[in-house]
Amino acid sequence: MASSSSPPPPPPKLPIPGRRNILITSALPYVNNVPHLGNIIGCVLSADVFARYCRLRGYNALYICGTDEYGTATETKAMEENCSPKEICDKYHAIHDEVYKWFDIKFDKFGRTSSPQQTEICQAIFHKLMKNNWLTENTCSSHMLNPTELIDPKCKVCKNTPRIRETDHLFLELTLLKEKLVDYINDTSVAGMWSQNAIQATNAWLKEGLKPRCITRDLKWGVPVPMEKYKDKVFYVWFDAPIGYVSITASYTPEWEKWWKNPDNVELFQFMGKDNVPFHTIMFPSTLLGTGENWTMMKTISVTEYLNYEAGKFSKSKGIGVFGNDAKDTNIPPEVWRYYLLMSRPEASDTLFTWTDLQAKLNSELLNNLGNFINRVLSFIAKPAGAGYDSIIPDALGAESHPLTSELVKLKQGLKSAMGISSDGNAYLQKDENVSEHRKKYAGSQAERSSQEVADAEAMKISNQLKSTILSEGGSKKEQKKQSGSSKCKAAEAEVSVAKLDIRVGLIRKAEKHPDADSLYVEEIDVGEEAPRTVVSGLVKYIPLEEMQNRKVCVLCNLKPVAMRGVKSHAMVLAASSDDHTKVELVEPPADAAVGERVTFAGYSGEPETSLSGKSKVWEKLAADLHSNGELVACYKDVPFTTSAGVCKVKTIANAEIR
């Protein structure tokens, strides 16, 4: 009789001699709230993509993560919700686990720091540090932030002013460990290709000067300090949280030391946001070095800047932005979210999430470009030998030695390269009519949204009552006429849409100096018509003549023609200008954009006006909202200039007006 029980889980992965063994961690998300999109791209998604890459390359990769559960914030949250810290951790660990599973994040182990293994390993490391004389006792009234320097401090829960008292604490002597630490940083930051923001943050700490750091706190929720004198204290969360990587691995396999005390055969890659850098490049390495044991030290660190939300910042404390459960509720597939977040990954500078940009990338990049390309490639592979590959893909000889494979953690650029391969794909379009609704739904904070839902329901109730009253009683002809006139006015206002601008992809066939004006160029520009248009542009002092030849530009084609020093200009080349007008750059379509193709704006439809007359002031009204954003994308408000090959951009001038 066949057994109905599920098959046993596979044995834990261990390092394999002769294979490339890669240990991957992402910063442990704090347990007291739901992760937002910035948290997800900042650590777990970035590490997941690298783990997938490693598995595809045939490396023996182990991806470890889990919730960071100890510390003041958990105790505070428990008091707010009138429950125990453990109940808070149980609740939010389950929420984090569910969110990451929906995003298809494939951990080998997603654990927690409130485990017996955490206590055992943390205390063992503490004993080694104490034995090696790297810990000292001192009176402490300050931690990472000095409470005595706070202005008008108040308790978050009871709102009372705290009393300052002195108490003995234990300190890790970073000053004495500096020589060992600097040797490690100098060697590994080069060999491990640390991201530039990680190097800068680390050097800033070293330059400021290392000081002893307190490792204990007067709390109940945490790893107990194993000394009689400090029996009522726990370890400071900055000290014990990184040890969570080790303890979670220990909860995965009792042979955890084969990963964590095996530096000759294991490479450690760590992913995090920029605010976590000093804990991973200064404090955790110092802790491990201080034990004198042969730990697997971090080789490569990949650090992100901040992903911002629409007009502001994501905020867990204020509930602002799109959170993991929100993403699920939109019914947008997780694969789309993964793609968008990776393309928006803030690797060198902060980036911006907007709903309209999400829509544009979905339409122009995933559907229009990649989808069709994949279909064509798979069709080709399936063709019989001679015409295709007969459904068998040949080996890529020499791929391992290719220089691009050495750039392992440039995830965003890797994805862009992959998308570039598909740029020859033909378009099929699919719009999402829900983006504007999502944008409205997730505006403001979570608390405001909840209040708004109640208000909206009440407003709908009142509205229905009014409708029934009007239908039963009727309205006067005068009032109906007044309402009709008002509607016409509103309709006229609504007609001022960016869709009225006829912006096309143009190709400058020839450019030369204006015969009678030193500051003007005269260009012959192909905009997809029978003959090129003559265009006059005041760009001489900003762009060299040789750079004006044979290049694609964005051209406003329905401005009324105007004579400029004797030459009539039949369109306008769009360019971005710095605040002080000392620098001007052309708005450039993607290289593969078709000449004559109309530039579109997601959410705005309709035909352009034949000619933008001076009386209507349409151009003047719309031009005020044309600009480049922080990602150098040309936008109307926050909607990108979009072609079938992608969005239009400028080279270097961010947040600049476009005219």
Image (cartoon, rainbow, N blue to C red):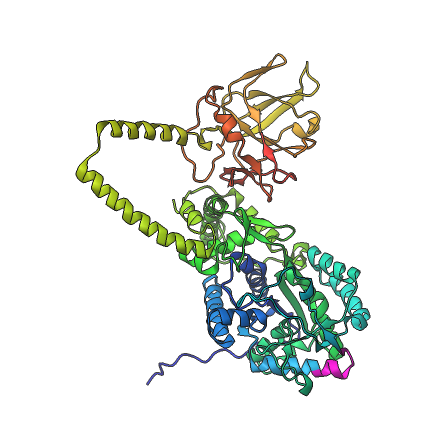
Left-right relation of 426 to 475 = right
Left-right relation of 159 to 138 = left
The residue sitting at 76% across, 84% down in the picture is: 131
Res 47 → quadrant: bottom right
The foreground one among 407 and 400 is 407
Task: Work out whether residue 419 can be spotted.
Answer: yes
Q: Could you tell me which quadrant the C terminus lies in?
A: top right
Identify the residue at the far bottom of this view: 228
Region in magenta: 127-137
State the image coordinates of residue 393 (x, y, percent, origin top left): 52, 57
Left-right relation of 162 to 606 = right
State the image coordinates of residue 378 (x, y, percent, origin top left): 46, 52
The residue sitting at 36% across, 28% down in the picture is: 489
> In this figure, what is the number of numbered marks?
0
Residue 132 on the magenta segment: yes
Q: Could you tell me which quadrant the N terminus lies in?
A: bottom left
Identify the residue at the far left of this view: 472
Task: Work out whether residue 63 can be spotted.
Answer: no
State the image coordinates of residue 337 (x, y, percent, origin top left): 48, 54
State the image coordinates of residue 449 (x, y, percent, origin top left): 42, 54
Tell me if residue 609 comes above or below residue 314 in the rendering.
above
The foreground one among 120 and 485 is 485
Residue 605 on the magenta segment: no
Tell me if residue 567 comes above or below residue 377 in the rendering.
above
Tell me if residue 96 comes above or below residue 388 in the rendering.
below
Res 176 → quadrant: bottom right
Identify the residue at the far top of this view: 566
Res 113 → quadrant: bottom right
